[in-house]
Amino acid sequence: MQRRNFTSGVFSAAGLWALAAWRPAVAAGITESDAALGVRAALERGATSAVALLGRNGGFLDNPKVRIPLPGFLNEAAKVAKFTGQQKRVDELVTAMNRAAEAAVPQAKNLLINAVRSMSVEDGRQILTGGDNAVTQFFAGKTRAPLSITFLPIVTRATEKVALAEKYNALAGKASGLGLVRKEDANLQQYVTGKALDGLYLMIGEEERKIRQDPVGTGSAILKKVFGSLK
């Protein structure tokens, strides 16, 4: 019943226009129902894969693509720390920042899936006819604000255990006043929250590109049928 509602809600009469814009799919005989299922499957696969990859020990810390460093000037200043005997403390702070992101990400799954289920006709059209980052843009647009609210207290609890966190905020605040650190990066908890979301959407985008480039390799019949028709 839920699947039927999704199909009729997203690809109803207005949805025919979106499907018509997707000419390769039409030529391949893709139905409204197929298109709806394909888009939904791509969205859910990207979300669940990104959460699984990042929401575990080492998900951020051990992945150079999303590892969260100290911002701007402070990252450069931290390189001097090894000459002043402070490297260990800086490393502890960076580790805590990344562990905080890893702890927050699992909370994103339900909101991401709910975004899929509330997808509008216009959302569907943009994803069907969009580029390689259409799914990423969809999720960021629908979930970044509420996920920021969800992530922040989790990140705060994780980072406040590190004594250097308070000193970071004091130093970053001064650096921000001098234009050395962006204002939005001057608070450790907000900075980590933003970077955690950046990493999440980046990994969703990576999974999306895999689907578009190799739908057969996903092992999903519906993804092969729908996204394969674009090739």
Image (spheres, rainbow, N blue to C red):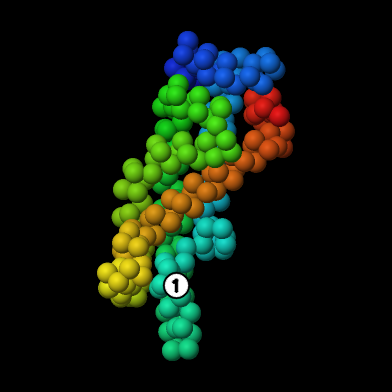
Horizontal side of 168 relative to 29 (left or right) equals left
Q: Residue at x 39, y 54 (%)?
A: 194
The spot of residue 196 in percent (x, y) is 44, 54
The spot of residue 123 in percent (x, y) is 46, 27
- Within 10 Å of the Cα at label 1, are there few (<14), some (14-19), or many (20+) other Cα atoms? few
Q: Which residue occupies the foreground of this view, 160 or 227?
A: 227
Q: Residue at x 48, y 49 (%)?
A: 200
Placement of the C terminus among the 4 image quadrants: top right
The spot of residue 70 in percent (x, y) is 43, 68
Q: Which residue is mark 1?
A: 75
Q: Which residue occupies the foreground of this view, 102 or 66?
A: 66
Q: Residue at x 41, y 46 (%)?
A: 107
Horizontal side of 222 relative to 150 (left or right) equals right
Residue sticking out furthest to the front: 179
Position of residue 84 relative to residue 38, above or below, is: below
Position of residue 3 relative to residue 103, above or below, is: above
